[in-house]
Image: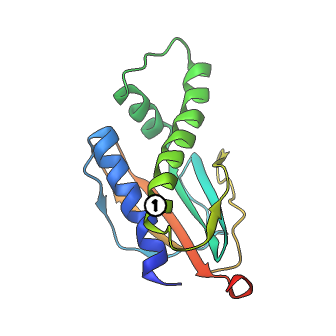
Amino acid sequence: MKAEYINPFIKATWNIMTSMFDLNPEPGKYYLYAPEVSHRWEISGGIIIQGSLNGFAALRMSKVLTKKLIEKTGLSFFDENEKDTLAVDMLKEVLNVITGNFLTELESANATVSLPFISQGKDHILKLPTIPVIAIPYISSFGPFLVLTGIVENPQAL
């Protein structure tokens, strides 16, 4: 895993959270992610990367944070069910924007990215490729979130 592959996703995430939502997220100490460990996140959204690079990138957060992000866009809610649906849609849209920026940074790599997918619920599990994944916790005025990224060169594609 090389910094030149994972840093563009981290940079794109920070840029989007700053420019779209006027947040100033502060990173915590990164660590090697262990998917079997219990966690506090209620919703996660991820993408799969394939081609000359293989990997995974995701955001994990509370539904409270997703709802605050929605409110920041100016949308108003009518009932709780709509909030939950919009929380999923918001995370997918944020991932779409991050992915576009991420791919622009890595345009020299011949890689494709899946559509964003969502997993949610208490201790939900993300099926990850069998590669190391770095976890970077962030704090913001709207609440914490976690960035996961693990991207490696695909020797079969080279």
Tell whether 134 sits left or right of 29: right
Tell whether 111 sits left or right of 98: right
Q: At which x and y percent is residue 140?
A: 30, 49
Query: Is there any visible trace of residue 132 in the rendered image?
Result: no
Q: At which x and y percent is residue 142?
A: 33, 41
Query: Is there any visible trace of residue 152 in the rendered image?
Result: yes
Which sits in the foreground, 17 or 8?
Answer: 8
Q: At which x and y percent is residue 35?
A: 64, 69
> On screen, 8 above or below 154?
above
Residue at the spot 67% in from the left edge and 86% down from the top edge = 158
Quadrant housing residue 156: bottom right
- Under mark 1, the amino acid is Thr
Residue at the spot 71% in from the left edge and 82% down from the top edge = 157
Quadrant housing residue 34: bottom right
Residue at the spot 61% in from the left edge and 55% down from the top edge = 46
Which sits in the foreground, 158 or 34?
Answer: 158
What residue is disc 1 on? 104
Q: At which x and y percent is residue 109?
A: 55, 74
Residue sitting farthest toward the top = 78
